[in-house]
Image: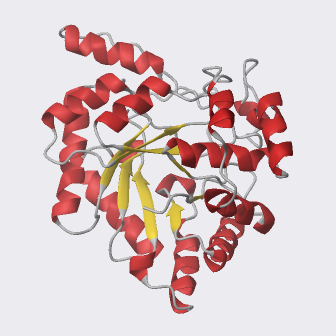
Amino acid sequence: MPAIGLGTFGSDHVSADEMARAVRGAGSVGYRHFDCAEVYGNEAEIGEALKRLQGSGIARDELWINSKVWNDHHRPADVAAACERSLRNLQLDYLDLYFVHWPFRNHHPPGCSVESRSPDATPYRHEAFMETWAAMESLVQRGLVRNIGTSNMTVPKLQRLLEDASIKPSCNEMELHPHFQQPEFIAFLEAQQILPVGYCPIGSPARPERDRTPDDTVDIEDPVIVSIAQAHGVHPATICIKWAVQRGQVPIPMSTNPRNYLANLKAVVEDPLTDEQMSAIAKIDRDCRLIKGQVFLWESAKDWRDLWDLAGAITQ
């Protein structure tokens, strides 16, 4: 996997066509890793962009393409169909990595209110997740995907998955930025040789106002990040990307601005941070999670392991 990818989640402010143009532009300046998902609603347009990149002389095996199965397709019969749909839309024969987007089967229909609670929502159950994971493993066996991974998990959930899985996750995608560093989780992943892939690597300052809460912080405005950026003569966002890569995680910043996504790419290979600067950033962790999944209490816990799952769900 390349050390940096281009995220393709555009939220409310980036059209599918604009995101596809960014994929073409990023590919032309050297990006080879693109992080996609069916729920982002732009895989068909990105598929056209990937086709054009390959037509320009970039071989398929130079690209690393991720996608994810969404919450309403966790049932085993639905997992393969979702993967095949993403492959058709992306115009690919295989995915390099396929994630379970969230460990819960919660689902909200498109266009619903942010405050809505899904009538079909269910909390995490290990047995249900293992049914989904077995279907993910079958995708590897069929050659549709090369690797499978988890996303938005917790350590207790991953511990149980590792006990029961036939194919362990190669990656876990998770929120990671200087104000939310998750050091204990990172240490666990390293011990298990699971690669952390970090979304919101600069703290998602463009996140819609409706998704913000009073305790949100902006990493690129942190005085430590700003001071280090001034010393390097770069934008503070570049420092967040440097920190992520040097820390051993794969950042997937989303940008449609050519100047910005080129700067993010250069951050991987140019002018690394010093040990002192890395230590200074380690001290500004505020445990500030920006992407807060809704949690639903489970009334049918059967044993202590189920209660442990519920405790893990609450930390989401």
- Residue 177 seen anywhere in this rendered image of the structure: yes
- Residue 124 seen anywhere in this rendered image of the structure: no
Q: Residue at x 33, y 43 (%)?
A: 194
Rendered view: 245 above or below 129 = below
Horizontal relation, residue 298 to residue 107: left or right? left
Q: Nearer the viewer, residue 39 or 59?
A: 59
Horizontal relation, residue 214 to residue 313: left or right? right
Horizontal relation, residue 273 to residue 82: left or right? right
Rendered view: 120 above or below 83 = above
Horizontal relation, residue 145 to residue 257: left or right? left
Q: Position of residue 30 (x, y in %)?
A: 61, 74
**Quarter of the image that includes the N terminus:** bottom left
Q: Position of residue 292 (x, y in %)?
A: 57, 27
Q: Residue at x 66, y 42 (%)?
A: 274
Rendered view: 221 above or below 216 = below
Q: Position of residue 135 (x, y in %)?
A: 20, 50
Q: Nearer the viewer, residue 192 or 104?
A: 192
Q: Position of residue 245 (x, y in %)?
A: 56, 49
Rendered view: 202 above or below 19 = above
Q: Residue at x 85, y 52 (%)?
A: 233
The number of discs equals 0
Residue 275, picture quadrant: top right
Q: Residue at x 73, y 58 (%)?
A: 14
